[in-house]
Image: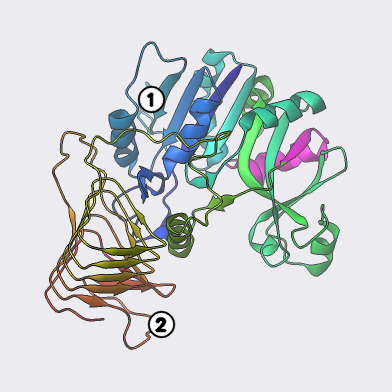
Amino acid sequence: MDLTLIILAGGKGERLKPLTQYVAKPAVSFADMRIIDISLSHAIKSRPQEIFVITQYLADTIENYIYAHYPIDPNAPYKLSILSPQEDSEGNLLFYNGTADAIRKNLHHLVRTKTKYTMILSGDQLFNMDLFKVKDLIEKLDANLCICCHPVSREDAPRLGILKVDSSQIITEFHEKPQDRKILDSLASLEGDRPYLASMGLYLFKTDALIQLLTTQHGDDFGKDLIPNLIKKRDVGGYIYEHYWEDIGTVKSYFDACLLLAKGKSGLKFDDPHHPILVPPHFTAPAQFHSNIIEESMVCQGAKIGKGTKILASLVGPKSWIGKDCHIENSVIVGHQPYNTTKYETFSTKIHDNCKLKNVLVDAETILDEGVVLINEKNLKKYEDPYIILVEGIIVTKRFAHIPKTYRF
């Protein structure tokens, strides 16, 4: 495709803390991969000439991962570059203040590519989308921009950017987080229980139009500052994507997405023959079991499960070491994917014998000594200590925590 693809991966992920205390949100593990692998998979399959990943917050955690798992191959059909904030030739420190600002400050790279189209993806979303269909729509409409939209319910609409699309798939209105009932009534684009179209923050521009927009219009953010003016000119198409889409914004959304995947109930299909997710190699051993009961769960590569341990409706991430006679239910063990692929013998997440976990998110590089119980015995709504924090009803262990023997919560 005559395409440059940009992945925006610089946000802080404040609502995903403590998982984003030490790693950027796109670099958080998701089963056998990182969240950003989903967008990178779609990017590679779209056959672009260049892929740019723009980073900022804890940029090294994304850079190290990509350079370890996506080697720069001079014979590859695309070029992959990572763009991070830096000091320019005049001594100015360049930091990105929003989605549009990040691309504007790297505009010389885009000008150099000379491709007809530029697609902008987010580095922290889960979806299976055929990007070629978005290109088909922008060509059909001869629009300067197409925005990918997802149907949502009236209940969800007030917390999202809502677009109205007419019968020809031209976007006629945009409202950011509409609260007024009358405005909501006027924004319905579809029939059924999901009549509203939320912006997914995924954009396909004609490159010339994007360059002109960024050089002639002020504003740091596409959705808030720049795109509303294009919509007024009726120059924006709306590509309606009705299948699975999850914007990983909170601990609960991450936790739920992991459990759906583990139970085989997720709309994200790694093995979809039409839109497979391309998982990069991690150079580790297969999972190992010893007389276990495992139900509605996923155990990732490199994990080792001790004798008599039960794992129910849970996800056990890569290179997790779990001892004997544990009971793990409705929980996510993030596991560990080291940047250095030669460290394949290392277990940095360990759950020792006789531990009991329910509704727990065990962050990477965490150790639970023998007999630890995490089940929220007192049914508390708020709690934090040096080892754990209660977030939206989920017990989250803190990264690098070493929870001592017989600790109970």
Disc nearer the start of the sequence (1/2): 1
For the residue labelled by badge 1, is the local secondary structure a helix, a strand or a loop?
A: loop
Please, what is the three-letter code of the amino acid marked with disc 1? Asp
Tell me, yes or no, whether the two marked residues, 1 and 2, touch with CB atoms within 8 Å: no
Is residue 344 shown above or below 300?
Answer: above
Residue toward you, 195 or 333: 333
Q: Quadrant of residue 309?
A: bottom left
Q: Is residue 379 left or right of residue 222?
A: left
Report the disc number at residue 266.
none
The residue segment tinted magenta is: 218-239
Q: Secondary structure at mark 2?
A: loop
Q: Which residue ends up furthest to the right in the rendered image?
A: 167
Q: Is residue 311 above or below residue 39?
A: below
Instruction: Give neighbour class at mark 2: few <14, some 14-19, many 20+ (Cα, 10 Å).
Output: few
The residue identified by callout 1 is 88
User: Label 2 belongs to which residue?
Assistant: 381
Q: Residues within 10 Å of mark 1 (few under 14, many from 20)?
A: few
